[in-house]
Amino acid sequence: MFADSTFAAVAMPQTLQLTFSPTENADAVLVNQRFCEAAGMAGATVVLRKRSLDARGKQPFFIITADVYGPGELPLLAQGFLGRDVHHAVPVHIIGSGPAGLFAALSLIEQGFKPVILERGKTVKERRRDLAILNKEHVVDADSNYCFGEGGAGTYSDGKLYTRSTKRGDVAKILQELVHHGATSAITWEAHPHIGTNKLPGIIEHIRQHIIACGGEVHFGQKMVDFTLENGKIKEICTQNGSKWPVQALILATGHSARDIFTLLHKNKVQIEAKPFALGVRLEHPQELIDNIQYRCNAAENQLPPASYSLVEQVSGRGVFSFCMCPGGIIAPAATAPGEVVVNGWSPSKRNGKFANSGFVVSVDEKDFAGFEKYGPLKAMQYQALWEQKAFETAGNLTAPAQRIEDFVNGKASSDLPECSYVPGIIPRKMDEILSEDVVSRIRGALQVLGNKMKGFRTREGILVGVESRTSSPVRIPRDKENLQHPQVQNLYPCGEGAGYAGGIISAALDGVRCAEAAALTLQYA
């Protein structure tokens, strides 16, 4: 059978790459045997390194890379983050318990510092109840929703772990830590690893318990509402319940939707910058249709995973691209305040839902924010909020505006809509009424091109649901390239997606580790 890919060998293995049909790929014993035969070593130890699916030809096939070890060559377990007793160590405060905040905490423990996490929201279990109310009663808790709470936006937004940020740090170490806390070891060798929204909460909870067991602290219901600056450093932070926390170093990992934090920084004259992001819609199709387009066959009957896609087009000088594609997933309400409609997507671990959805967005920048100059560095954030509020006003009560893809391309209103996974409900509306002409025209142009490339993608069974706006932070908090400190505030470490330095679970985790290392280094020489 397979050895776990979380091992690293003592001896030098043979690294081999073989191809397998979907049926062969599903037979673990056969795969193991093929690698042993290719290496010329019966009974060898096979350690998977990467598996990817190539569906470009008539017959999809899997490409598997593995290390093969001979008899007596025993691999060693790779390590995640080293746990230490930091009950009485120097504290480092972290605002936010998303991937950046949690992995900053794990890194601090490894380096002998005591992480103190202050989270505005609730634990994953309490947060789940607020999400149920959000979906069923359409009531938004501004501190406990799909973006805020233990684990951050990543907890309830699918758990996709693919990243291109391999030069920013040790991705394998991050993945191994997730395995240690309950993820399947397959995430260490799948080309596009995925945990699933149903499994992530338990993993996040286990990480929190580990942090506390080592001596770290995690405090919920502690939204930062103010801070005191003295001699170019943050001396103290205040939270909404009146608590005051003296700090030596502060890692700010609040996520891309913490508008109150951006506003607080601006109010206190801490330098921030408007940042381009992307704006658009969610596309949703029946998963079976996407399977047929991509595989030209039934996925389940042919032992293939639910199909995904990645689409990029240039239309009138701007990029239009798919984002956060969720096979077998649902569209979720990601609003963080009353009076706005925001959509996102997620998939369970098996990706076995009826629908496939993906963000489909257009890059927006300074030219789009031109009418918002009075907001200064918050202009991109206000531009983002405008379209979310417009979607709410057009539909009302968290009901999302939607339009059939073919009607949208042809500029027609949809008289009715197909079934949709968005639980709060959808209502027929033209996207021309929801988004700017610049965004609408480019999405329309891209869909016209893609409809020719992917036969069947333009269909009346596919719909656009608006708006997809939280693709990345509309604000960047500047920091020094070397010590990662804010240029004005020496002990402030802007971190992760909210600061504009990450774009997903893994890149945020890596950035959290980098900021933790920078803070620890500064404190060691203070």
Image (cartoon, rainbow, N blue to C red):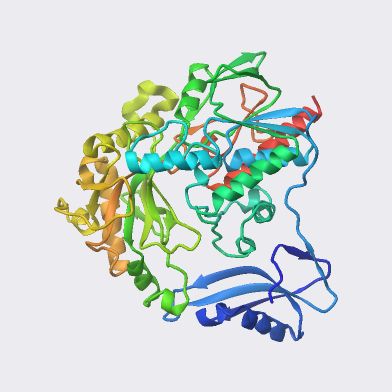
Residue lying at the far top of the rendered structure: 230
x, y (%) of residue 279?
A: 36, 43
Residue in view at x 47 percent, y 39 percent:
147
Using the rendered image of the protein, determine whether residue 321 is visible from the camera's viewpoint.
no
Where, by quadrant of the figure, is residue 398 drawn?
top left
Residue in view at x 40 percent, y 43 percent:
132
x, y (%) of residue 369?
A: 35, 32
Residue in view at x 42 percent, y 74 percent:
299
For the C terminus, give its image quadrant. top right
x, y (%) of residue 430?
A: 20, 46
* 260 shown above or below 356: above
Nearer to the camera, 170 or 442:
170
Nearer to the camera, 272 or 326:
326
* 509 shown above or below 50: above
> Would residue 258 be found to the left or right of residue 111 on screen?
left
* 44 shown above or below 456: below
x, y (%) of residue 10?
A: 83, 67
Nearer to the camera, 514 or 245:
245
